[in-house]
Image: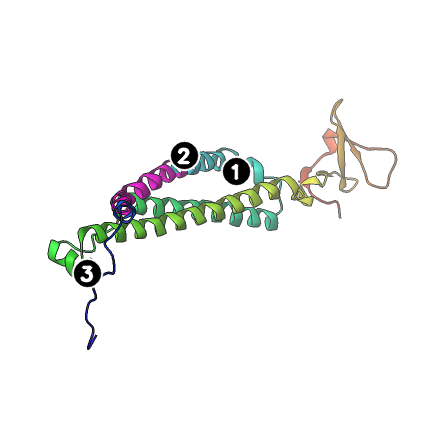
Amino acid sequence: MTGYRPRRPSSAPTAFDIAERDAFAVMSAASLDTVRSSAETWRNGLTAFITLVTTGVVIKGRDTTGDLSTGWRLALTVLVGGGLLAALMGLWQSLAAQAGTRPRAATLSAVHGRYGSVAAYKVALAVAAARRLRRAQYLVAVALSLLLAGIVVTWWAPADAGKDKPVYLKVSHPGGPSCGTLTSADGGRFRLRIPGRHDPVVVPLRDVTNVAVVRSCR
């Protein structure tokens, strides 16, 4: 700045000022290792979490969604899939925070030119790693929310109404096809309970020309 002249401090730094400066220098020097150590802990926890959830989805996924309708199954897929994706993204961010990224400056002159000192360079790396770690923590929160919503869906989603419908047997014979629920098939006879009739229809096996399983007798 034109006309600027440095001015001499009015008093020498106190012992407290010097101690604070030295403490801050120590803290700054250790900040990168501290952040990366925290990121490693998050990485290990996320790895175990993803392994556990993925194993549960693979083992119980089919049994969990087998009785749900298509709409609820799609919602559960989106929630669980989104939760796993968010967890994987969080794992990637924690890995990047723990292992570091491509060096921003490869030579000492480049470090001095951009950051002024090696200490400032380390602080910049620590700040970048801390940002990635915060992103990882945010993504973990999103993953847990989605997976918890998926669990709630499995608890409260109604079963597919189509799976509760009775299965009917359609028996073709010379007297015409008879359709109803099978009550017995012993003694050489089919016994069918026809909707709307009190007594079952008895069809001798020798007269049967065709048997088919149907969802409806209409």
Give me the C-alpha separation between circle 1 and circle 2. 19 Å
Q: Indicate the amino acid at tag 1.
A: Gly
Give SS at disc 3: helix
Residue at 70%, 40% in the rendered image:
164
Along the line of sight, the residue nearer the viewer: 125 or 152: 125
Give me the C-alpha separation between circle 3 and circle 2. 39 Å
Let me know if residue 101 is in the magenta part.
Answer: no
Q: Where does residue 18 sit, x and y in percent of width and height? A: 25, 47
Q: Indicate the amino acid at tag 2.
A: Ala
Q: What is the tally of numbered marks visible in this picture?
A: 3
In the displayed image of the protein, which residue is found farthest to the right? 198
Q: Are marks 3 and 1 in contact (CB under 8 Å)?
A: no
Residue at 32%, 39% in the rendered image:
37
Residue beneath disc 2: 48
Q: Are marks 1 and 2 in contact (CB under 8 Å)?
A: no
Residue at 60%, 51% in the rendered image:
71
Give SS at disc 2: helix
Let me know if residue 26 is in the magenta part.
Answer: yes
Q: Nearer the viewer, mark 3 or mark 2?
A: 3
Q: Residues within 10 Å of mark 1 (few under 14, many from 20)?
A: few
Residue beneath disc 1: 61
Q: Which residues, given as a range, are shown in magenta?
A: 22-46
Q: Are marks 3 and 2 in contact (CB under 8 Å)?
A: no
Residue beneath disc 3: 114
Q: Where does residue 160 sit, x and y in percent of width and height? A: 66, 44
Determine which of the numbered discs, if any, sits on residue 71 in the image: none
Q: Nearer the viewer, mark 1 or mark 2?
A: 2
Give me the C-alpha separation between circle 3 and circle 1. 52 Å
